[in-house]
Image (cartoon, rainbow, N blue to C red):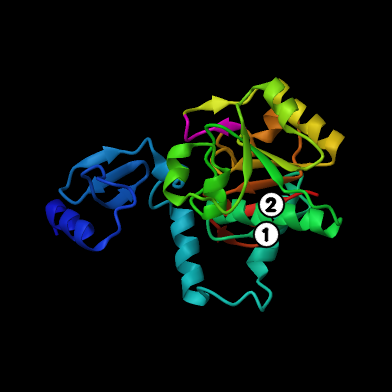
């Protein structure tokens, strides 16, 4: 099929969530090179929005996937999963986390983390309803994570939103101080905002968030969907700040376990 035929099929049968896309369609990749259906070759500096951090057709990853598909594609969570347990241990051993939960997407990882925050205070018999996030943030495309996202353009089509989040300006210490109170359940930070441009938070702001959470008994959550797994030069971005969270989420993830090669694209970790 040529590009125009693919575009016409897409426009006729696919819900145009992304509007008119860049008129390109790739059919294969090698390393950082992508080959389009017309035969032209492109260098990919985008990494599939940071998903393909190992490039395309990476031999170790390709072999691991093929080996696993020959054995098992899926088993129910009713049963124990060896590689899941090994990968969870590896994450805990290399982070501040105590336990790990695996989800299907970055948005689901964040959604699950919000549920865990609520459950934590439910267990303490505290009715805390406010979660603070930052303007310019992006936390996903589920209804809850859209509400958490501090950008009106993502929220407008889905109003009224089911969840209530309080948004403050990134690196605005005074606004953060004013927003936190006894009803605050958590502060959620992207240590480097990606959707709004590469905008790192200041060390002062992050340390203040930790101090306020400790003072009011709230939880500090980091959304490391775009910054985790080595993308900032350290395994986790929070290591640059030397400020540990209570919960953090990861995604677009590939790693070796101690037993065999494992692929797991999106993960939610916690430390509590």
Return the residue nearer the eye: 210 or 131.
131
**Above or below, comparing residue 258 to residue 231 in the picture:** below
Q: Secondary structure at mark 2?
A: strand
Query: Which residue appears at 24% of the width and 50% of the height?
Result: 25
Residue 232 seen in this snapshot: no
Disc 1 packing (10 Å; few <14; some 14–19; many ≥20): some
Q: Quick check: 218 left or right of 163?
A: right
Query: Which residue appears at 55% of the width and 49% of the height?
Result: 145
Residue 226, position in %: x, y? 53, 40
- The residue identified by callout 2 is 269
Residue 81, position in %: x, y? 65, 71
Give the magenta-colored segment's residue range. 191-196
Main secondary-structure element of the magenta-colored stretch: loop
Residue 177 seen in this snapshot: yes
Q: Is residue 243 magenta?
A: no
Residue 216, position in %: x, y? 84, 37
Contact, CB < 8 Å: mark 2 with mark 1?
yes
**Above or below, comparing residue 78 to residue 53 in the picture:** below
**Above or below, comparing residue 165 to residue 69 in the picture:** above
**Residue 101, numbered circle:** 1
């Amino acid at each position: 099929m040529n590009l125009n035929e693919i575009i016409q099929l897409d426009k006729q049968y696919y819900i145009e969530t992304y509007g008119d896309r860049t008129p390109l369609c790739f059919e294969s990749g090698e390393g950082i090179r992508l080959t389009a259906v017309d035969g032209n070759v492109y260098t990919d500096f985008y990494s599939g929005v940071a998903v393909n951090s190992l490039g395309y057709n990476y031999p170790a990853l390709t072999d691991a996937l093929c080996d696993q598909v020959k054995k098992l594609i899926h088993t129910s969570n009713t049963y124990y999963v060896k590689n899941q347990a090994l990968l969870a241990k590896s994450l805990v051993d290399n982070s501040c986390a105590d336990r790990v939960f695996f989800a299907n997407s970055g948005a689901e990882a964040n959604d699950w983390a919000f549920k865990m925050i609520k459950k934590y205070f439910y267990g303490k018999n505290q009715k805390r309803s406010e979660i603070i996030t930052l303007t310019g943030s992006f936390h996903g495309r589920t209804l809850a994570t859209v509400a958490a996202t501090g950008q009106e353009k993502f929220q407008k089509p889905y109003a009224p939103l089911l969840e209530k989040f309080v948004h403050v300006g990134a690196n605005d210490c005074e606004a953060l101080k004013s927003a936190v109170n006894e009803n605050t359940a958590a502060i959620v930070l992207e240590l480097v905002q990606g959707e709004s441009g590469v905008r790192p938070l200041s060390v002062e702001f992050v340390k203040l968030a930790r101090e306020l959470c400790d003072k009011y008994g709230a939880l500090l959550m980091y959304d490391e969907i775009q910054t985790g797994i080595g993308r900032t030069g350290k395994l986790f971005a929070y290591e640059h700040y030397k400020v540990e969270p209570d919960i953090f989420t990861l995604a677009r993830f590939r790693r070796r376990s101690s037993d065999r090669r494992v692929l797991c694209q999106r993960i939610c970790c916690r430390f509590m």
